[in-house]
Image (cartoon, grey):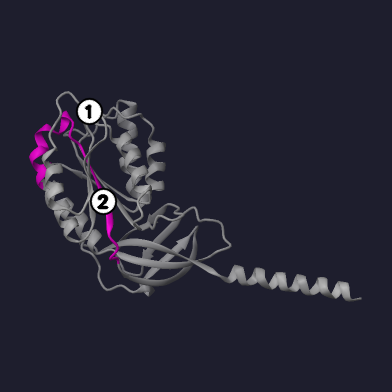
Amino acid sequence: MRLPVLVLLAIVCLAGGQRQAAAQAVERSLFVSVLGQGGAPVPGLGPDAFVVREDGRAVEVLRASRATQPIDLAILVDNSQAASPYITDLRTGIQAFAERMIKGGHRVAIIGLADRPTVLVDYTTDPAQVTKGVGRIFAQPGSGTTLLDAINDTSRGLQKREGDRRVMVVITTEGTDFSTPNHERAVDAIEASGAAFNALVITRRGGQDLSTDEARSRGLVLDQGPRISGGRYTQLLSSMALKGELDQVATDLENQYHVVYARPASLLPAEKVVVTVKEPGATVRGTLAPLGKPPVAGA
């Protein structure tokens, strides 16, 4: 009679261990921008202000504080022939933006897009190195951009970096692109990088030319990349507006929240994470910290 009793005890202990494991939670992190109706950051929000849902199911928000983690920031800049009229404004805007981010303790890299992706300055916190990189921004005659290829390369590089906060800022014209026209691969690369993808596009009068596969693929990436990664997409009617827009990007990043939430360890990875706030009229964009990240949506 003793053997069945031992088996029963073993089953009871096993079931208890399974319940304990299921009750444990895994912490996940989000970096969240919250903008009010006028576009200014909304300060002073605590954990009770945020609502996080994984695949439609609300999860517990544990902590919310100002994000202080250093950012790995990749600036991808169009230096093709199409950028010729804008080079002075590009240099001025990027120089000020990069110096501001470095002053905040963040690492900055600058990648040129003409003909092939080219690192003008690797990730650095040295303002002098940034100045040298900005000085290498000039329009290459007869060249087109390689934006999608640069996104793929930069995403792979960011994946190898150890930081929790990763950001890509693309500054481009609507000139000819010579990348391999595969927008799905580029969007997948953005997701895998764990970076917030921001696109600032200097537009032509009359609208964008989408007559080629390359142009259509680029347009899809510039539209989808920010939406799935918690970044922003802005069309600039003049290159003179670039510096102001980069100032706004910097302000967003400087005022982000670090939101930590709990999810049951036993659940499958979520396919969609949505973060909102209990703040009327607020715009929210969120990017998951890189470890095991599904895409993030904002509302």
Label 2 residue SS:
strand
Select label 1 or label 2 by which is in front: 2
Q: Which residue is mark 1?
A: 144
Dot 2 surroundings within 10 Å: few (below 14), some, or many (20 or more)?
many
Q: Residue furthest top?
A: 142
Please indicate whether residue 231 sits to the left or right of residue 12 in the image: left
Query: Neighbour class for label 1 at 10 Å: few (<14), some, many (≥20)?
Result: many
Q: Residue at x 56, y 70 (%)?
A: 24
Q: CA distance from mark 1 to mark 2?
A: 24 Å
Residue designated by label 2 = 73
Q: Position of residue 192 (x, y in %)?
A: 41, 47
Residue 118 at x, y = what percent? 24, 35
What is the magenta range?
Answer: 67-92
Is residue 1 placed above or below 167 in the rendered structure? below
Examine the image and state in which quarter residue 154 appears. Answer: top left
| In-image side of 141 versus 299 (left or right) | left
Could you tell me if the residues under marks 1 and 2 are in contact, i.e. CB atoms within 8 Å?
no
Q: What amino acid is at disc 1?
A: Gly
Mark closest to the chain's N terminus, 1 or 2: 2
Of 293 and 241, the residue lying toward us: 293
Left or right, residue 29 beside residue 105 = right
Residue 17 located within the stretch drawn in magenta: no
